Image (cartoon, helix red, strand yellow):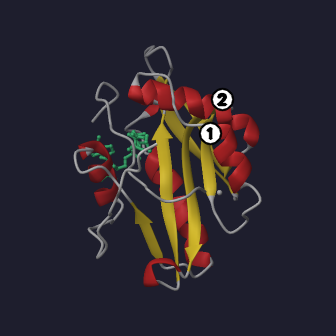
């Protein structure tokens, strides 16, 4: 993909989302302005907060290159009380540069329990530098600790970037088929 491509939205027909942890690592990255050289910054993976909504909205708009139609504030507000669900942001030098929102379904789809990655995004300026992977790995670790084995997501068939990303994380086709019906409204 790369920042220039326009990925489609994740096609999750399910209901919302969110929870957390705090991990930091030292990480090198080129400056925002593409100035020469790299500098060491701290990549902090932390729980999502309500006040992250605007920045996440901005990341979403930068990815799709159109105003975001997702109410992230509402999503985060709904998620926060659900302590079993995990949603993290990645902060670099104090700036939120990526997010991943997941939730847990107990007893749904014939499974004992499962976690779903509902939406994610990395600021196009910072794509391709391992941020998405770190977010995913930290979320997987929390679910692993909670003995939640099955992680699902749903990706548009033509979202090659997301398909490639999830493939590198070890995702494969599931046994489920997404069905949909559009209501007249
Ligand atoms: C998909 C996305 C989260 C990846 O984040 P990222 O920080 O750029 O990815 P990473 O640098 O962590 O890459 C992790 C792995 O995925 C692979 N990958 C990431 N983007 C890729 C792409 N576009 N094409 C092919 N592979 C890709 C990387 O090569 C890497 O593989 P490796 O571990 O074997 O080296 C990010 O590109 C993004 O936000 N895309 C838009 C998502 C979107 O549409 N969101 C809105 C609706 S939910």
Residue underneath mark 1? 72
Q: Residue drawn 43% across and 15% down? A: 36
Q: Residue drawn 40% across and 28% down? A: 64
Q: Is residue 66 above or below residue 11?
A: above
Q: Earlier in the sequence, mark 1 or mark 2?
A: 2
Q: Residue drawn 70% across and 52% down? A: 78
Q: Residue 133 at x, y = what percent?
A: 44, 52
Q: Is residue 64 above or below residue 117?
A: above
Q: Nearer the viewer, residue 54 or 95?
A: 54
Secondary structure category for the residue under label 1: helix
Outermost residue to the front? 184
- Is the residue marked by circle 2 packed among few (<14), some (14-19), or many (20+) residues within 10 Å? few
Residue 5 seen? yes
Side of 4 relative to 50 (left or right): left
Secondary structure category for the residue under label 2: helix
Q: Residue 124 at x, y = what percent?
A: 42, 29
Q: Residue 84 at x, y = what percent?
A: 68, 69
Side of 36 relative to 168 (left or right): right
Nearer to us: label 1 or label 2? 1
Q: Are marks 1 and 2 in contact (CB under 8 Å)?
A: yes
Q: Residue drawn 58% across and 63% down? A: 103
Residue 48 seen? no
Measure the alpha-carbon separation of dots 1 and 2: 8 Å
User: For the N terminus, which image quadrant?
Assistant: top left
Q: Is mark 1 within 8 Å of ligand 1?
A: no
Q: Is residue 107 above or below residue 51?
A: below
Q: Nearer the viewer, residue 166 or 38?
A: 166
Q: Nearer the viewer, residue 69 or 87?
A: 69
Question: In the image, which disc is placed on residue 54?
Answer: 2
- Is the residue marked by circle 1 packed among few (<14), some (14-19), or many (20+) residues within 10 Å? some
Quarter occupied by residue 107: bottom right
């Amino acid at each position: 993909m790369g920042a220039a491509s326009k990925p489609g939205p994740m096609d999750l027909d399910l209901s919302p989302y969110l929870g957390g942890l705090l991990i930091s690592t030292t990480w090198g990255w080129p400056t925002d302005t593409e100035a020469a050289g790299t500098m060491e910054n701290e990549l902090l993976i932390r729980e999502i907060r309500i006040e992250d909504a605007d920045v996440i909205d901005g990341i979403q708009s930068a990815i799709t290159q159109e105003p975001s139609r997702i109410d992230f504030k509402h999503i985060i507000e709904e998620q926060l009380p659900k302590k079993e669900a995990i949603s993290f942001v990645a902060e670099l030098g104090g700036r939120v540069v990526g997010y991943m929102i997941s939730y847990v379904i107990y007893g749904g789809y014939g499974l004992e329990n499962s976690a779903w990655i509902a939406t994610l995004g990395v600021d196009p300026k910072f794509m391709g530098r391992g941020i998405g992977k770190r977010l995913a790995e930290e979320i997987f670790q929390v679910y692993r600790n909670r003995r939640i084995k099955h992680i699902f997501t749903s990706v548009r068939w033509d979202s090659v970037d997301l398909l490639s990303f999830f493939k590198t994380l070890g995702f494969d086709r599931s046994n489920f088929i997404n069905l949909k019906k559009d209501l007249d409204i």
